[in-house]
Image (tube, grey):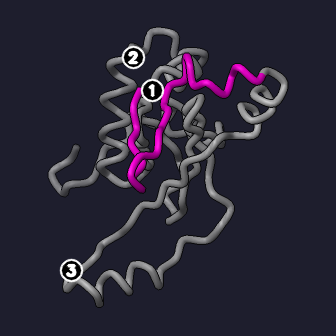
């Protein structure tokens, strides 16, 4: 960082940012590290983690924290929602616009000055759904990264 609170864009940060934006997915730090190593063979996983944290704090990328799965990262910093598969942990962008009216409604109803909001839709991705229709025992939840049960009108998540 420099004295004026802006981030110095090192070669490592630039390559991490370029690779993340080129992926158009929501990779984990491990997945991104494998890709960055193709360009910078000596870069460590710790360096990737450290730079992802700094890039997220500076607003260059988004850190995605989802229910029960590893943190994921993306280069898209625009307001948008995510879909998370409760079976395999896959994360996709939801193809609907972010609802600014929702944020305003919460502002008005609570007295909070809401700065932003996140919405995460939970479901079963097309790949998992397809595999479960081909293999009915796959619906049991065994081996899944994240599963959920519904009890007393409340969803509970467990690994």
Using residue 46 as the reference point, say whether residue 145 is left or right of it. right
Residue of label 3:
112
Spatial separation of the CA atoms under disc 2 and disc 1:
8 Å
Q: Is residue 83 left or right of residue 151?
A: right
Query: Which residue, given by chain and number where applicable, does mark 2 sit on?
Result: 45
Mark 2 nearby-residue class (10 Å; few <14, some 14–19, many ≥20): some
Q: Would you say the residues marked 2 and 1 are in contact, meaning their CB atoms lie under 8 Å apart?
A: yes
108 relative to 24, above or below: below
Mark 3 vs mark 1, CA separation in Å: 34 Å
User: x, y percentage for residue 84?
Assistant: 56, 43
User: Distance of mark 3 from mark 2, alpha carbons?
Assistant: 39 Å
Q: Measuring 53% from the left and 26% from the top, which residue is drawn there?
A: 32
Magenta segment boundaries in residue numbering: 136-159
Q: Are marks 3 and 2 in contact (CB under 8 Å)?
A: no
Secondary element at image label 2:
helix
> Which comes sooner in the sequence, label 2 or label 1?
1
Q: What residue appears at the point 59 percent right and 21 percent down from the top-left corner?
A: 35
Q: Quadrant of residue 59?
A: bottom left
Can I make out residue 63 in this image? no
Residue 3 disc label: none
Q: Going by the picture, which residue comes out furthest to the bottom?
A: 108
Q: Answer yes or no: is residue 6 visible.
A: yes
**Quadrant occupied by the N terminus:** top left
Q: Secondary structure at mark 1?
A: helix
Quick check: is 50 in the magenta stretch? no
Instruction: Report the residue at 33% width, 81% height from top.
Output: 106
Q: Secondary structure at mark 3?
A: loop
Is disc 3 surrounded by few (<14), some (14 to 19) or many (20+) residues within 10 Å?
Answer: few
Badge 1: how crowded within 10 Å, few (<14), some, or many (20+)? many
């Amino acid at each position: 960082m420099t004295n004026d609170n802006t981030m110095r864009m090192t070669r490592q940060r630039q390559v991490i940012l370029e690779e993340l934006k080129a992926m158009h997915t929501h990779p984990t730090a491990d997945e991104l590290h494998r890709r960055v190593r193709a360009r910078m063979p000596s870069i460590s996983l710790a360096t990737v983690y450290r730079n992802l944290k700094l890039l997220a704090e500076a607003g260059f990328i988004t850190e995605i924290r989802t229910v029960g799965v590893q943190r994921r990262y993306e280069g898209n910093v625009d307001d948008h929602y995510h879909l998370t598969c409760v079976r395999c942990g896959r994360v996709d962008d939801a193809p609907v616009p972010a609802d600014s009216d929702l944020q305003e409604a919460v502002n008005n109803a609570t007295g909070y000055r809401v700065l932003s909001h996140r919405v995460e839709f939970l479901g079963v991705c097309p790949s998992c759904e397809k595999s479960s229709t081909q293999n009915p025992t796959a619906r049991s939840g065994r081996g899944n990264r994240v599963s959920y049960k519904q009890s007393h009108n409340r969803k509970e998540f467990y690994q």
